[in-house]
Image (cartoon, rainbow, N blue to C red):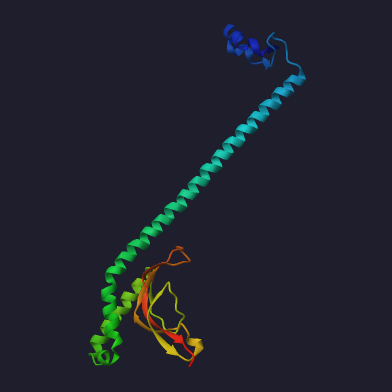
Amino acid sequence: MIIYMDNEEEIKKQEPEENFQDVTFVDSTEDGDELPTKDIVKKLREDLKKARAEKEEYLTGWQRAKADYINLQKEMDQISKSVSIHAKERIIENLLPALDSFDMAFANKDVWENVDKNWRTGIEYIYQQFMTSLSNSGVEKIDKVNVPFDPNLHQSIESVLTDDQSKDHIIEKVIQAGYKIGDPANTGQVRIIRPARVTIFEFKTS
């Protein structure tokens, strides 16, 4: 038995649901006539086109939401790393006077060597532990000599003339060590806490 779609609701009201187990509903015209096959195919194509459009709309929305979430997560990670570096930077700034005191004590080798050996060894051990902890936190000391002058890392306070052209703009001495924080491989950020104060060689022909 075939019942046309326009009469479906009315018939359902008139007869119990169990009587419709063998009923097939088909699309019909306003007059109740069965739609021609070509019209049914056309309607199916329109429905399919609409379904595909809705699918693309939902997919695009989902992809956009996913991209926004990933970007937000990256932004939050970057902010977290920046805050962490800034906090460490403030701590190191407060420790600079103590670090400079160590450097000044070690710089005068004649006086330092005359200090009681056991006491001197203990102080040196404490200093090494201190520096290891800073290194593990991403803090690096800027105190190398015989390396090229880098305005991002060094502050030149004096030039020393040399006739060796290969030493031109090479660090001759570190007057005061500098410090930087951050690991480019992991954070993408490096901050100079304090540039090293240095003297540099300056080539000058006679």
The answer to whether 132 is drawn above or below residue 108 in the figure is above
Q: Residue furthest top?
A: 14
Q: Residue furthest front?
A: 206
Q: Nearer the viewer, residue 197 or 134?
A: 197
Q: Nearer the viewer, residue 27 or 205?
A: 205
* Left or right placement of residue 138 versus residue 109 in this view: right
Is residue 9 shown to the viewer in this render?
yes
Which residue occupies 57% across, 36% down?
58
The answer to whether 30 is drawn above or below residue 189 in the figure is above
Is residue 135 shown to the viewer in this render?
no
The answer to whether 37 is drawn above or below residue 124 in the figure is above
Give the tally of numbered discs.
0
* Left or right placement of residue 22 versus residue 93 in this view: right
Q: Nearer the viewer, residue 112 or 117?
A: 112
Rendering coords of residue 84 (x, y %):
36, 60
Rendering coords of residue 12 (x, y %):
59, 10
* Left or right placement of residue 49 versus residue 96 in this view: right
Which residue occupies 28% across, 78% down?
100
Q: Quadrant of the N terminus?
A: top right
Which residue occupies 54% across, 42% down?
64
Q: To which quarter of the image does residue 143 belong?
A: bottom left
Which residue occupies 70% across, 25% down?
44
Rendering coords of residue 176 (x, y %):
33, 79
Rendering coords of residue 62 (x, y %):
54, 40
The answer to whether 111 is drawn above or below residue 17 in the figure is below
* Left or right placement of residue 168 versus residue 157 in this view: right
